[in-house]
Amino acid sequence: MAERTKYILDEADLPTQWYNVISDLPEPPPPPLHPGTREPVGPADLAPLFPQALIEQEVTTERYVDIPEEVLEVYRLWRPSPLFRARRLEKALGTPARIYYKYEGVSPVGSHKPNTAVPQAFYNAQEGVTRLTTETGAGQWGSALAFACAQFGLECEVWQVRASYDQKPYRKLMMETFGATVHPSPSELTESGRAILKQHPDSTGSLGIAISEAVEQAAQDPDTRYALGSVLNHVLLHQTIIGEEALRQFQLAGDTPDLLVGCTGGGSNFGGLAFPFLREKLAGRMDPVIRAVEPAACPSLTRGRYAYDFGDTAGLTPLLKMHTLGHDFIPDPIHAGGLRYHGMSPLISHIHELGLIEAIAIGQQECFSAGVRFARSEGIIPAPEPTHALAACIQEALRCKETGEEKVILTALCGHAHLDLPAYGAYLAGDMVDNELSDAVLAQSLATLP
Ligand SMILES: *Cc1c(COP(=O)(O)O)cnc(C)c1O
């Protein structure tokens, strides 16, 4: 084959700025509200939880934010990440579509999460914070923060959703190897955890509960702050390194995407890939369709309500205007742990309301079928989350096969599955079911919106 299928940037071409999509939107997203007063939260409200630099990035209207040299140095351990053309998958599908994937599984923990964990740890360390708390579901975010804390000499304490803590011992060992302390959530260590355990002693936990526990701990100790792995504006800002690199790599490939697809849990890998392309679209330089893909069992964008809701279960966080299934929604235990959050990034929600992106939901069996197909042709076993994006790629590629359209599709392959293989085990054994969310359960959960 004459053409290159892997597009690699030199280290010297690593982008040195993150892109803030808010600067190019016709209107900014609605602000977070204080849960008591229902007034927009100010920097002072957030100071117990986040360092000043991140609070500023949360609200900045600047178009670009410089990436600190100390952060670039750590990024260079694995960045720039490769862009691949999935020629073998295209061939297996018999499609005239051209499929590209930006591979974030080359990071130290195997996902895109360190792109934000590293700057978050850096800014906290710079402001004299000594310990970070956080929640984690499948363990991708917890291991990313544990790695990042190790780079800047911070302690790291992680509340891991009980179901994953029990099912995924290797992630816990990875976090501990990087130096973190890991607790199953709900735990007896916090008010929020104890309250849940009192009502539901066998609770398997949720991201919302784990967030409550980590936030509660951080709020009580002046030397401790909290770190969130998705959802917030500053997280999506840091992830734009993915799309900025991909734009340069598309120049190398001499191609332009017609369709971007990405999986959405809290929206960070999707936003990170899509926002720089959205900038180009808004400027009229290209016109890709941008499509978010979520699990049918946790469909916040496609079936949730766009309303103010808490980010956590106990109601400790500010109210966020977002697509939500209700803050005490506990999704069925699907295998894509990173897509089990009840809400969606307010920025992604707002951009969806503006009609700039579309969203679809897919059941997990179709997703794992896509994951297996991808693994057998491209040689990478995708994490359960991006199998959702790959299923959407394959849907589109098969449509192109019927119409003969040579569509150019780009997706973020945001992680590999080396520590999630039991999920493939369940699929291969035929034990996987599709947990479609019923209207009755959804209505009940939405009734609790504040
Ligand atoms: C955390 C995670 C997700 C979901 O989070 P987003 O903020 O929506 O990106 C998806 N894929 C992987 C591999 C993850 O680790």
Image (tube, helix red, strand yellow):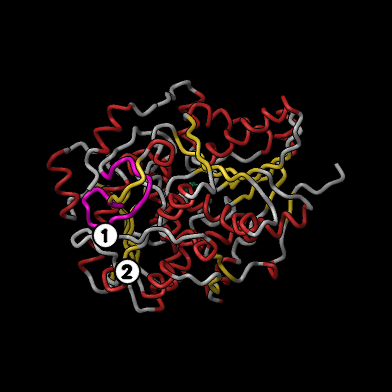
| Residue 403 appears left or right of 439 | right
Please tell me whether residue 188 is drawn above or below residue 385 in the rendered image: below
Q: Residue at 59% x, 55% y: name it.
A: 278
* Start-end of magenta stretch: 310-327
Of the numbered discs 1 and 2, the one sitting upstream in the chain is 2
The vertical placement of 427 against 76, above or below, is above
Q: What amino acid is at disc 1?
A: Val
Residue drawn 48% across the image and 70% down it: 61
Residue tagged by mark 1? 215
**Secondary structure type for disc 1:** helix
- Count the labels in the image: 2
Does 319 lie within the magenta span?
A: yes
Q: What amino acid is labelled 2 in the image?
A: Arg
Q: Which mark is residue 131?
A: 2
Residue 59 percent coordinates (x, y): 41, 68
43 sits to left or right of 366? left
Q: Is residue 127 magenta?
A: no
What residue is drawn where x is 31% and y is 68%? 225
Question: Left or right of 307: which side holds 353?
Answer: right
* Quarter of the figure that contains the N terminus: top right
List the single residue furthest toward the left.
198
**10 Å neighbourhood of mark 2: few (<14), some, or many (≥20)?**
many
Residue at the far top in the pictured view: 430
Residue located farthest toward the right when viewing the structure as drawn: 2
Tell me the SS state at disc 2.
strand
Against 91, residue 266 (above or below) is below
Give the residue displayed 51% in from the left and 63% down from the top: 238
